[in-house]
Image: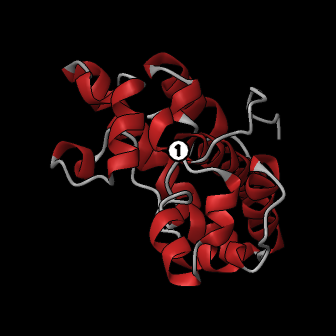
Amino acid sequence: MSANKMSIEEVNALSYEEFIARFQSIVEHGMLIAGAVWSYHPFLDFRHLHKSFCDVMDSLPICGKQAILRCHPNLAGKLAQQGKLTAESQREQAGAGLLGLTDDQRQLMNERNDAYRNKFSFPFVICARENRVEAILNGLQNRIKNTEEREIHTGVEEVKKISYYRLLDLVQTGGSEFSPPRL
């Protein structure tokens, strides 16, 4: 995929419409986020581009942050079972082992997803690229104990990690390899 990655100069040369078309999936169903990020261009480098996505998310009121979380599908949920995930979510969930659950794991995942969504009114969000099935199940079990305020914060921090990896799929880092920021 690296041959198809854009340079930061190519990113900066995109029109508003081209930028949105290319980057609206950095945040799940995030056309409005991409539109807001475009206003930060020109971007100095990959880190500045990612930081711009993070800054836009951080600037949102609580209801905006909740909306970002609500745009995410349940992990291994109905959309996954029906093959209706975005291409990015499909790859991420498959890589975490979520599309090959045993019947017992699927039942436990569904029960924990339902309990979490019932408590917080948004789905459990975790960076699947950094986790596997057991860690995700444990995360669901542990994070449901948090307050809503804490979960909104934690969920948005996980979206920032997800956006980092999604950007890494599309944009060159400029030769310096680095790991995702610990947000």
Q: Amino acid at mark 1?
A: Lys
Using the rendered image of the protein, determine whether residue 65 is visible from the camera's viewpoint: yes
- Tell me if 110 is positioned left or right of 132 in this view: left
- Tell me if 11 is positioned left or right of 57 in this view: left
Circle 1 sits in a helix, a strand or a loop, which is it?
loop
Residue 47 drawn above or below residue 16: above
Query: Which of 86/125 is in front?
Result: 86
Where residue 51 appears, as percent x and y from the top left, is: 81, 55
Residue 59 drawn above or below residue 119: below
Using the rendered image of the protein, determine whether residue 121 is visible from the camera's viewpoint: no
Which quadrant of the view contains residue 153?
A: bottom right
Where residue 44 appears, as percent x and y from the top left, is: 84, 57
Q: Which residue is mark 1?
A: 5
Which quadrant of the view contains residue 135?
A: top right
Q: How is the image coloured?
A: secondary structure
Query: Which of 80/21 is in front?
Result: 21
- Indicate the quadrant containing the N terminus: top left, top right, bottom left or bottom right: top left
Residue 168 drawn above or below residue 18: above
Q: Residue at x 69, y 67 (%)?
A: 12
Query: Which of 53/139 is in front?
Result: 53
- Tell me if 65 is positioned left or right of 176 in this view: left
- Indicate the quadrant containing the C terminus: top left, top right, bottom left or bottom right: top right
Where residue 159 appears, as percent x and y from the top left, is: 63, 50
- How many numbered circles does the render carry? 1
Q: Residue at x 63, y 71 (%)?
A: 13
Where residue 124 appears, as percent x and y from the top left, is: 53, 47
